[in-house]
Structures are given as C-alpha cells and as structure tokens.
C-alpha cells in the first residue's frame, strides 16, 4: 500500500494494474474474423478510463478479452504483473476483474437478492439495500423479484451495475452503463462511479458515448476498427467534441428543417 | 415403528422433522402405521379397497393434513384416497411418496387421489416424490389425481419430483366450476435413464373460472420427459399454460400442448419452451467468480425453486 502511494507520487513511474500486450483476437463463429488487432494498453491503478469510439469498433470485445470471455490468438495480459493470459473467466473474477455486460442476461428463476448474494459471496441484506440504492432502485420493490422477462431494459442495466458494485475489484469494466438509464438517474450514476473511484483503489474502465461520463475520465481510449486509434486526455476529447459540434451547426439546421443532408462544407 | 431411513423419507416428501401438527396418516410398506385426527378433520380407512377417506368439516380454517407414504421394501402398493373439503374450509394437504429401494426388485406406489373441494373452499395440495437407495430395482410412482372444484372454490396444486424416481406417469384431471380458481406449479427433474410423463387436463366448466399451470422441468443425462398439458374451456373462462424445460446432455423432452375452446368467451393461452441453459447466463455467473459447475447448479436451482 505504502509502496503504491509512493509509486504514484513519483513522477514518470507508472503504476500499472492491467496490461494488454499485442493482443489479437480472432473469432471463428461462422466465418473467421479478426476483431481486435495488436492492442496495447496499460491501465493504471486508481484511474478512470473511458473507452469510446464508433459502433462495432471493438470496445466490448476488448472488455470481454480482459474478462477472459474471448481468448486472444496472440498476445498476453497481465494483472498487477501476473500473466493471466491462460486464466479462465472464473479465475480472473476471483483475482479481482469484473465486467458489467452491455446486454445483461435475464435469469428465469433467479431473484435479485440471489444474484447479489452470488456476486458478493455473502448474503447481507443491509448491504444489498445499499447497493440497490446506489443504482437508484428501491430495495423493497426489487430484492425478491425474479430477473426475468418482466424487467425493463433500464432496470436490468441497474441490477447489472449493482453486481459489480457488490464485489471487491481491482479492475471493473462497465459496458455502456448509461444505456437505458433515464436522464433523471444519470447524475446519480455518475456520482456512484466517482464514489467507487474514491472509495477503492481500483482501475475503472467505462465504455461510453456520453459526454457526462467522458468528464469523469483521467484518460480517454478511442477504439475503432479493432484497434486503439487514440489515447488522449479528457480535455482533448471534449475540445474535439466542441469542434465537431460547431462544425456541424449547418447540419443541425438541416435536421431542424427536417431535411437530412450529409453535406456540410463549413 | 419409524426408523432413521423412514424419518429421512418423511422429511423429503412432507418436510416433516417431527410428528406433524394437526391431522395425519402415515402409510409404510402398504400399511397405515400412525394416524391422528382433529375435531374438524376425520380420517377413515376405506372398507372396500386400500386407502382412506379424509373429511374436512365445512368452515375449517388454517388446519393441515399430512398423508405421506413411504416404501422401504421392494413391493407394489396401490392406494385410493378420497378427500372431502367442506364448504368455506381453508386447508393445506401434504401428500408425497418416498421410496428407499436397496434391492434389485421394483418398488412401486400407485396412488389414486380424488378431491371434492366444496363451495367456496380453499385447498393447497402439495405432492412431493422422492426416491433413494442404491439397489438396481426401479423406483416407480404413478399418481392419479382427480379434483372437482365447486363454485367459488380455489385450489393451489404443487407437484414436485426432484431426482430419484426412475419411472413416473402422472395423470391429473381438474374440473373447475363457476368462479373456481386453480394454480398448478409443477417441478420435475430427471436424470440418468429416468422416464417421466405428466398429463394434466383442466376442464374449465363454469363461468369466470380461471386456471394457470406453470410447469418447469430439467432433463439430464439420458432421461426422457413428456408433457401433455391440456386446457378445455366450456364457458367464459381464462386459462394459461407456461411449460418450460431445460434440456441437457442426451435427454429428450416433448411438450405437447392442447388448448380447446368450446365457448367464444374462453381465453386460453399456451406457452412452451425447451432449450439448454443460455450460455450468457453461465458466463455472467462465472464473471462473478463461480465455476461453470457452480453456475449451472445455481441456475437450475433457481429455475426449479
Ligand atoms: N463473437 C463474435 N463473433 C463474430 N463477430 C464478432 C463477435 N464479437 C464481436 N464481433 C464483431 O466485432 C466487431 C466489434 O464488436 P464489439 O461488440 O466489440 O463493438 P463495440 O465497439 O462494443 O460496438 P458498440 O458500440 O456497438 O457496442 C463487430 O463488427 C462485431 O460484429
Ligand atoms: Mg459494445
């Protein structure tokens, strides 16, 4: 602990928690396709990374590779200096890696209470109430509900987030946590992430397209076409968004006028 | 009279840790071994054939009857039980059969249960089947249940068979009169070479009668399951069947639905699904630190609960 603190204080010395080295992932379902190419990433302790980029760029695939759901055909992964390339999903979970799915599964028969118990490794009702509160759900209404088809998309996402909050993690990856979460709850969600970051010494990776989530980032990782196309500061990205916004004022006018035009020459 | 094996069987089929409260009749190896009646619930041995009559007085509230059957020898036992649930009564009936077979011969229990649920009466009927013992002799259970629910009556039927029974053919017929309500929950797990067949027919005879059947099963190894779940609507009524099976290894499951309306105001729905455990569910639980086996067990346990 002391070393870590001291380490981070020393200028120029990186305190890496998770490293992806030359990772290539090829999937063979149906036709063979390389979905990630030569990914190199060093994620430090105690930092928030926001991963963004176009749809189909490879963000979820990187997250699944970190979790062990996808196996790289080339390259290695290290957690706190330990080679975890050959570790299973279960082993990685037990070592402190967590992943909140972009599209969480539903469970016929499993109640919220039971899933949170599995996640935390213990049944503590007070803790579970706090967790649900953190994701903006009223414990009374949800603890005994089955996580089945009756759950709305947003409710399902909140439960999914809670399953990670329940665990003591070194690396937590949230895949578009804000998707389906209403505007009113959004603030609470960003606060929850900020608190998580403050409370624990963890590496937080949030896959998101939201400006308000980008604002939490220490660094922004841009992924497109299966590669890391940029790693930059939050301010750079925000400036770029600003620029795109003003660039496309004319296009916005077109949309207002109900004519969608891709031509924007300004 | 009851040894350690008997006590365990009783616990499995009737959740009995001690001698139950209220009325009971315990049948072991084809003979009644212990019985208790109450002021409101009488139990009488049938004269013409093996079995008992259970008579619940009208208006009896909050009482229970336990009628477990246990077999610890290889033998064939056939029993006829009749239940009279008096008007406006509200009772719990727990039946169930446990077999402990260590021999190489077949142990079989066939029970015919007939219920008359009178006007406005409420009954919850729980039937559990359980088999154990390392003998090669088959453990066979063939229950037949007929329930007549009179006007305004309400029946909740819970049928559970988790492992250990090699062969089972379950026939259930329920007739619902005016304003009668029915909820059936069925839970079935078969493994190895086991065979199970469940035939449930519900006749919605009276106006505004409602029926809901929720059947969930897991078929493992080389086991086979067949479900014939049938709703027949003869009046303005509502009925819903949900039949869900998880299939694993080389098991075989057939779900054969039938809904028939004899009245234009009958609303009947049948939903049936068979599939393996969704891999996303397994993966999700593994990302929480469970092994694949633990994840599978947690999913099956939740599903069959
Ligand atoms: N198991 C798979 N089999 C085949 N193709 C896959 C598989 N997983 C991902 N892909 C492909 O890899 C590419 C990257 O997918 P990924 O889900 O990682 O994108 P993403 O950046 O998360 O996109 P989004 O913003 O839409 O969530 C896509 O073209 C996708 O179709
Ligand atoms: Mg994605």
Image: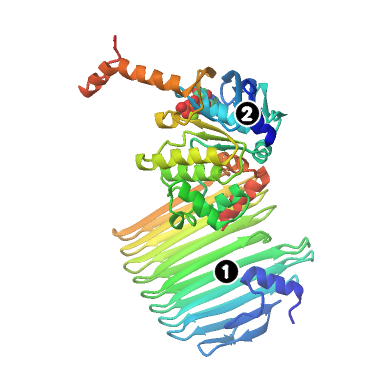
Residue B156 on image: x %, y %: 47, 68
Image disc number at residue B23? none
Where disc 2 sits, the SS reads: helix
Left or right of residue B41: residue A150? left
Q: Residue at x 40, y 19 (%)?
A: A239
Residue A193 on image: x %, y %: 49, 38
For this orientation, the residue located farthest to the left is A257
Judging from the image, mark 2 belongs to the subunit labelled A
- Mark 1: few, some, or many residues within 10 Å (few <14, many ≥20)? many
Q: Are marks 2 and 1 on the same chain?
A: no
Label 1 within 8 A of ligand 1 by Cβ: no
In the rendered picture of this protein, how many numbered marks are placed on residues?
A: 2
Q: Nearer the viewer, residue A229 or A43?
A: A43
Residue B210 on image: x %, y %: 38, 64
Vertical comparison of B155 with B164: above or below: below
Q: Residue at x 41, y 79 (%)?
A: B118
- Mark 2: few, some, or many residues within 10 Å (few <14, many ≥20)? some
Vertical comparison of B230 with A200: above or below: below
Q: Nearer the viewer, residue A69 or B53?
A: A69
Q: Residue at x 63, y 85 (%)?
A: B35
Image disc number at residue B127? 1
Quarter of the rendering containing residue B16? bottom right
Q: Nearer the viewer, residue A11 or A134?
A: A11
Where disc 1 sits, the SS reads: strand
Q: Nearer the viewer, residue B136 or A9?
A: A9
For this orientation, the residue located farthest to the bottom is B39
Residue B271 on image: x %, y %: 44, 51
Residue indicated by mark 2: A8
Left or right of residue A9: residue A137? left
Vertical comparison of B287 with B269: above or below: above
């Amino acid at each position: 602990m002391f070393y870590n603190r001291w380490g981070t204080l020393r200028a120029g010395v990186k305190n890496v928690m998770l490293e992806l080295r030359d990772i290539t992932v090829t999937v063979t379902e149906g036709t063979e396709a390389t979905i990630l190419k030569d990914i190199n990433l060093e994620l430090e302790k105690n930092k928030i990374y926001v991963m963004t980029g176009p749809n189909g760029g490879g963000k979820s695939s990187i997250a699944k590779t970190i979790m062990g759901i996808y196996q790289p055909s080339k390259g290695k992964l290290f957690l706190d200096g330990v080679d975890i390339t050959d570790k299973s999903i279960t082993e990685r979970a037990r070592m402190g890696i967590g992943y909140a799915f972009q599209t969480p599964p539903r469970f016929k028969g499993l109640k919220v209470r039971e899933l949170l118990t599995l996640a935390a490794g213990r049944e503590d009702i007070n803790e579970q109430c706090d967790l649900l509160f953190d994701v903006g759900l009223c414990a009374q209404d949800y603890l005994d509900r089955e996580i089945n088809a009756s759950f709305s998309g947003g409710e399902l996402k909140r439960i999914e987030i809670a399953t990670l909050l329940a665990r003591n993690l070194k690396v937590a990856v949230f895949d578009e946590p804000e998707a389906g979460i209403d505007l009113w709850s959004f603030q609470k969600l960003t606060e929850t992430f900020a608190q998580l970051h403050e409370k624990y010494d963890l590496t937080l990776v949030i896959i998101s397209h939201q400006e308000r989530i980008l604002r939490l980032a220490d660094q922004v990782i841009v992924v497109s076409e299966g590669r890391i196309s940029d790693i930059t500061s939050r301010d750079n990205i925000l400036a770029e968004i600003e620029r795109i916004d003003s660039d496309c004022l004319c296009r916005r006018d077109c949309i207002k006028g109900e004519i969608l035009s891709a031509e924007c020459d300004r | 009279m009851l040894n350690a094996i008997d006590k365990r069987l009783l616990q499995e089929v009737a959740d009995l840790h001690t001698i139950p409260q209220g009325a009971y009749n315990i049948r072991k190896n084809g003979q009644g071994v212990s019985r208790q009646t109450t002021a409101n619930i009488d139990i009488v041995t049938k004269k013409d054939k093996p079995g008992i009559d259970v008579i619940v007085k009208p208006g009896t509230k909050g009482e229970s009857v336990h009628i477990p059957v246990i077999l610890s020898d290889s033998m064939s036992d056939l029993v006829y039980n009749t239940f009279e649930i008096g008007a406006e009564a509200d009772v719990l009936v727990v039946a169930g059969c446990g077999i402990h077979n260590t021999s190489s011969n077949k142990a079989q229990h066939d029970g015919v249960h007939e219920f008359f649920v009178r006007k406005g009466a409420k009954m919850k009927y729980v039937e559990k089947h359980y088999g154990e013992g390392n003998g090669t002799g088959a453990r066979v259970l063939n229950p037949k249940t007929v329930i007549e629910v009179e006007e305004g009556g309400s029946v909740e039927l819970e049928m559970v068979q988790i492992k250990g029974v090699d062969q089972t053919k379950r026939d259930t017929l329920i007739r619902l009169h005016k304003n009668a309500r029915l909820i059936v929950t069925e839970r079935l797990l078969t493994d190895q070479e086991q065979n199970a067949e469940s035939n449930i027919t519900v006749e919605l005879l009276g106006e505004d009668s409602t029926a809901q059947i929720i059947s969930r099963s897991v078929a493992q190894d080389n086991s086979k399951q067949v479900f014939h779940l049938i709703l027949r609507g003869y009046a303005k009524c509502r009925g819903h069947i949900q039949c869900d099976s998880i299939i694993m290894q080389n098991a075989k499951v057939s779900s054969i639905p039938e809904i028939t309306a004899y009245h234009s105001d009958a609303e009947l729905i049948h939903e049936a699904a068979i599939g393996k455990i969704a891999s996303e569910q397994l993966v999700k639980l593994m990302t929480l630190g469970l092994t694949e086996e633990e994840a599978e067990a947690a999913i099956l346990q939740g599903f069959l609960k």
